[in-house]
Amino acid sequence: MKRKLLPLTMMLCAGLVTAVITFIRGYSIIYKLVSLLIVFLVFYAIGSVIVMFLDHFDKVNSRQEMIEDEVIEKDADGDVIGQVDQTSEGE
């Protein structure tokens, strides 16, 4: 599933549950609409935060992979001789 659809999916599923529960219990239409609006806003915010964290973790992981892919050659004194990218060597 695409990540940008995650908040919308969470919001709609929570809204469906809220609508069914308020319908079964026979609440007034104003109470149903207010509770549905609150649930929509809360679950959209939660979904957006989750997507933000997942995007952040992907950036950190990709940055870490790029660092691990680089090989730095050093001589006996510790001076850098050259930098080799492992991805281009295999081709």
Image: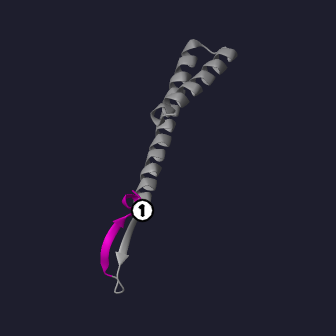
Residue name at image x 57 percent, y 13 percent: 29
Residue 13: x percent and y percent?
Answer: 58, 26
The answer to whether residue 56 is left or right of residue 12 is left
Q: Nearer the viewer, residue 24 or 72?
A: 72
Among the 4 quarters of the image, the one containing residue 14: top right
The answer to whether residue 26 is left or right of residue 87 is right
Residue 7: x percent and y percent?
Answer: 49, 33
Residue name at image x 36 percent, y 86 percent: 76
Among the 4 quarters of the image, the one containing residue 67: bottom left
The answer to whether residue 6 is left or right of residue 27 is left
Q: Is residue 56 part of the magenta span, yes or no?
A: no
**Which residue is disc 1 drawn over?**
69
Write the start and end of the magenta stretch as one range.
79-91
Residue count near mark 1 (Cα–Cα under 10 Å), binned few <14, some 14–19, many ≥20:
few
Residue name at image x 44 percent, y 43 percent: 52
Residue name at image x 36 percent, y 59 percent: 88
